[in-house]
Amino acid sequence: MEPISLPDALASFTERWSPRIVTTVNDYDVRVAKVEGEHVWHVHDHTDEFFLVLDGELHIALRERDGERTVVLPRGSVFTVPRGTEHKPYAPAPAAILVLEPTGTLTVGDRHDEVPEHVDATTGHALA
Amino acid sequence: MEPISLPDALASFTERWSPRIVTTVNDYDVRVAKVEGEHVWHVHDHTDEFFLVLDGELHIALRERDGERTVVLPRGSVFTVPRGTEHKPYAPAPAAILVLEPTGTLTVGDRHDEVPEHVDATTGHALA
């Protein structure tokens, strides 16, 4: 096992919204993704989801008990979406994120709106 | 819950080797720390430990079955120390890291050499 450079990992693929697994921690995956435009409204019923913005800016729309709001994460910011909270990530310009979630967690959650063609419904891909 | 800026979190304290918890993900903590000089040889018997270098460079000495080696993580690199592997982090110059481990995990592990005064034996501190 050797360290992984996140810039190198991100340079190894071009697909948007299609996470690559860079390492695992116990039964969790650390994944990186290039993102741009809208993801899809979805919810993880059984797990929180952690986001760290590596480059650019990520918006996450949240449907909470008190209504809908959007959090904005500039580069270097982190946010955890609590389990059971419907959310939709959105990047106004090309960005790169790191996410952490249990191995096997689907990018589109347990329930979701219709998945657009540019969103990869996956549990993450191995690095090339 | 609002996003946390890691630069702001790091600017809120000065202590070395004394992690602050920036968010939790299920029963895991995401912690950030300022580091410089040597940590201490220690081992986590029951959990992997994830490192991401936010600034500077981190070295991690590892005692593996085949002997001792050191991995070098430049800024933007990640590495997971497998459970049961004795290790000692070291930063040749001031650096900043993000670590992920189960809530309650001690910085000095389950077994360790004598803890030097500049190393905080803690399960992480709340952000101010």
Image (cartoon, coloured by chain):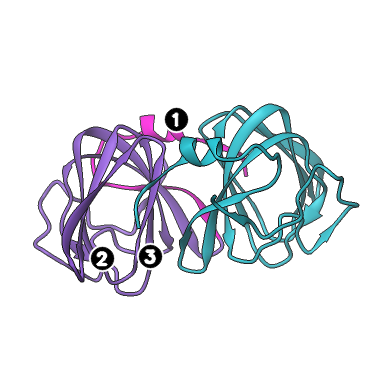
Chain colours: A cyan, B purple
Which mark, by number, is residue B8?
Answer: 1
Label 3, on which residue?
A: B48
Residue at left offset 35%, top offset 74%: B46
Write down the quadrant of residue B1 in the picture. top right
- Compared with residue B105, is residue A22 higher up or lower down, i.e. above or below? above
Q: Amino acid under label 2?
A: Gly
Q: Are marks 1 and 2 on the same chain?
A: yes
Which mark, by number, is residue B109?
Answer: 2
User: How far is disc 1 from disc 3 in space, using C-alphas?
Assistant: 27 Å
Q: Is residue B13 left or right of residue A46?
A: left
Most distant residue in the right direction: A114
Residue B30 on image: x %, y %: 45, 51
- Callout 3 secondary element: loop
State which chain disc 1 sits on.
B
Residue B50 on image: x %, y %: 39, 55
Q: Which residues are magenta?
A: B1-25
